[in-house]
Image (tube, rainbow, N blue to C red):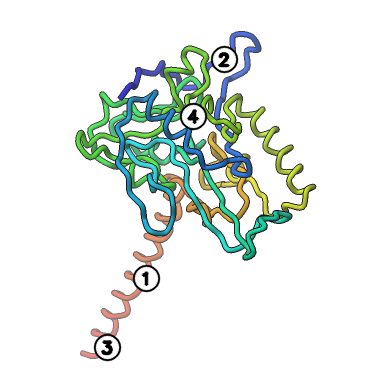
Amino acid sequence: MSNPTPTLHTTTANDPVTGAARQVGFFTDTSVCIGCKACEVACKQWNQLPDDGFSLTAKSFDNTIDLSATTWRHVGFIERDEPVSGQETNLGDPFSWLFIADSCKHCEDAGCLDNCPTGALVRTEYDTVYVQPDICNGCGTCVVSCPFGVIDKHPTDGRAWKCTMCYDRLKDDETPACAQACPTEAIAFGELSELRERADVRLAELHDRGVSEARLYGAHDDDLPGTRGLHAFYLLLDSPDVYSLPTNPVAPQNTVNEGWRSMAGALGAMAVGVGVAMLSGKWAR
């Protein structure tokens, strides 16, 4: 696998022309995804990822099933017995086939990064989340800390791997391989602020066409407060759970206070119980 060492920054790098902090990302518009899997192939070719073989779940024509340590961009197939609003299939029974080109979300609040004990996960000068394979010790803390189930341990070397947003291509001012290969431009890459504006315009356009079920997922910080938004966000044509996305993902570090409050409540209840038991024993004597 090809993974260059990132230039580490505590803040995002500044654009040499505008001086503004650079934040790049993906906007994946599922309404124009055709399920061709060109992005999957391009990702594997560029990052030298091995073939995972051919397997089917008997529930879908999707042959790669899920994201993994060796599949960093995955196109999911969703078959429904209802059409998209305004869609005419001419197939008799109501039917629609949704696709989603899924990848790491590069969360604003990244559970994998904040819980990594070795510092193997870092935020690059492009504000993306990157795994340094030479520092990863394969502990798996990042795997259980990702609310999306994205990051995964490699079956042979045991280290964690995921989408790098083609960091090596970014260093050469090139578009990530998946977005470059997408024939319908369903995967758009660029400055995060511009992608958010583009997503808002596209959503309004679909609503004007009567596609009322269209919605954005993770485009803005307040969309998913548990991760403070995503740097790889989506336009969906159904609820997130239909696309196997969590409705309200939360990075583990954002539930620490809630955990302490629960523990304090439990300890308080235990103390009261012990006190009652001691008093009961005293009066019984």
Q: Amino acid at mark 2?
A: Asn
Circle 3 or circle 1, nearest the eye? 1
Q: Is residue 130 left or right of residue 208?
A: left
Q: CA distance from mark 1 to mark 2?
A: 52 Å
* Residue name at image x 29 percent, y 32 percent: 50
- Lower sequence index among marks 3 and 1: 1
- Lower sequence index among marks 1 and 2: 2
Q: Residues within 10 Å of mark 1 (few under 14, many from 20)?
A: few
Circle 4 or circle 3, nearest the eye? 4
* Residue name at image x 47 percent, y 42 percent: 75
Locate residue 126, reporting x and y percent. Answer: 51, 22
Which residue carries the number 2 mark? 14
Q: Secondary structure at mark 4?
A: helix
Circle 4 or circle 1, nearest the eye? 4
Q: Is residue 246 left or right of residue 113?
A: right
Q: Are marks 4 and 3 in contact (CB under 8 Å)?
A: no
Q: Residues within 10 Å of mark 2 (few under 14, many from 20)?
A: some
Which residue carries the number 4 mark? 178
Q: CA distance from mark 4 to mark 3?
A: 74 Å
**What label does residue 79 carry, if any?**
none
Q: Are marks 4 and 1 in contact (CB under 8 Å)?
A: no
Q: Secondary structure at mark 2?
A: loop
* Residue name at image x 73 percent, y 55 percent: 86
- Lower sequence index among marks 4 and 3: 4
